[in-house]
Image: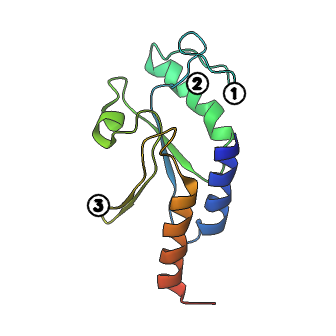
Amino acid sequence: MARMSAFQRLVTKYQRDVDFLIIYIEEAHPSDGWVTTDSPYIIPQHRSLEDRVSAARVLQQGAPGCSLVLDTMANSSSSAYGAYFERLYVIQSGTIMYQGGRGPDGYQVSELRTWLERYDEQLHGTR
């Protein structure tokens, strides 16, 4: 939950210049699988696209201001971007400008914040 709030602060601060998109992939800690005690949600493994849609709606409530799309049930986006189970990217005109480490240990909102601060400075100069 702390990660989402740090991420949400970035969304709030930079949403006028940046489009934020969450790609919801397979659930990392489903309630009927590899359970973790710090999960704020109880979401079972997705057995169908409808299950993934329902789970994504729960996630969307915690990420206002972010567009949300779903990965395929074959997890093609997760595979293509090496998300397993969370990862941050900046893509500009089809080019990857920033690629964060794989979560959970490599998921560093502070690195994304630094990239966004530099980008904001390029756009608007020093204020």
Q: Quadrant of the C terminus?
A: bottom right
Please tell me the numbered disc located at residue 38.
1
- Please name the amino acid that badge 1 sits on: Asp
Q: Nearer the viewer, residue 54 or 32?
A: 32
CB contact under 8 Å: marks 3 and 1: no
The CA span between labels 1 and 2 is 21 Å
Left or right of residue 34, residue 10 in this image: right
Look at the numbered discs 3 and 2 and tell me whether their residues touch, using CB distance below 8 Å.
no
Q: How many residues crowd around disc 1 within 10 Å: few (fewer than 14), some, or many (20 or more)?
A: few
| Residue at screen point 49% across, 17% down | 46
Q: Identify which amino acid the numbered label 2 is placed on.
A: Ser
Q: Amino acid at mark 3?
A: Gly
Point out residue 116 in the picture as x, y percentages from the top left corner: 52, 69
Q: Secondary structure at mark 3?
A: loop
Q: Which residue is mark 2?
A: 54
Per the rendering, the mark at residue 94 is: 3
Circle 2: element type: helix
Q: Is residue 63 left or right of residue 78?
A: right
Give the foreground label among 3 and 1: 1
Percent from the top left, x then y, of residue 63?
64, 46
The residue nearer to you, when weighing 18 against 98, is: 98
Q: CA distance from mark 3 to mark 2?
A: 30 Å
Q: How is the protein colored in the picture?
A: rainbow
Task: Give residue 106's mark.
Answer: none
Disc 1 is placed on an element classified as loop
Can residue 63 be seen from the camera position used here? no
Task: Classify mark 3: residues with Cα within 10 Å, few (<14), some (14-19) or many (20+).
Answer: few
